[in-house]
Image (tube, rainbow, N blue to C red):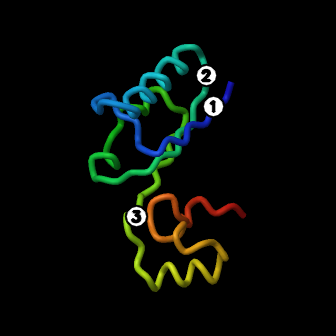
Amino acid sequence: MNLLFLPKLLPHADIIGGPILIYHRIKNLYSMGHKITLIAPTFTENDQEDKSLEPFCERIIPINSIRERPHDEVEVLYKRLNRPRLFLTGDGGYDEKLKMH
């Protein structure tokens, strides 16, 4: 089965809490023969360099998370997307790489 994971944090084997649970879930589902794609935000350089899930995922799509988007950029996105400004200001907002054509 093809599975898509969309966690709010990049899963790691060395982080206590939700990310380690998701890490082990991905690892176990892979061992059961599932194909896994992961789309997850990266907040730090360590996140961007982490390769711990590569053996278990068919594809990993890291999304550089923006904690605070500049006001001018928010206004441009607001006019273009007609979405509430709150959703365009940072994490959980718009990322050009996810644009569907």
> Which label's residue is closer to the chain start, 2 or 1?
1
Task: Please say if the residues under marks 2 and 1 sit with CB atoms less than 8 Å apart.
Answer: yes
Where is residue 24? Give x, y as percent: 43, 22
User: Which residue matches tag 2?
Assistant: 34
Residue receiving disc 1: 3
As measured in the structure, the alpha-carbon distance from the residue carrying label 2 to the one carrying label 1 is: 7 Å
The residue under label 3 is which amino acid type? Ile
Question: Number of numbered discs present?
Answer: 3
Q: Are marks 1 and 3 in contact (CB under 8 Å)?
A: no
Q: Label 3: few (<14), some or many (≥20) within 10 Å?
A: some
Q: Residue furthest top?
A: 32
Q: Mark 2, residues whose alpha carbon is within 10 Å: few (<14), some, or many (≥20)?
A: some
Query: Distance between the Cα atoms at labels 2 and 3?
Result: 31 Å
Q: Earlier in the sequence, mark 2 or mark 3?
A: 2
Give the camera-side residue of 2 and 70.
70
Residue where numbered disc 3 is placed: 66
Amino acid marked by disc 1: Leu
- Give the mark toward the camera: 2 or 3: 3
What type is the residue that disc 2 sits on? His
Q: Position of residue 14 (x, y in %)?
A: 27, 30
Circle 2/circle 3 CB separation < 8 Å: no
User: Is residue 89 rendered to the left or right of residue 96?
Assistant: left
Foreground pick, 43 / 100: 43
Q: Position of residue 64 (x, y in %)?
A: 42, 58
* Disc nearer the start of the sequence (1/3): 1
Residue at 28% from the left image edge and 52% from the top image edge = 45
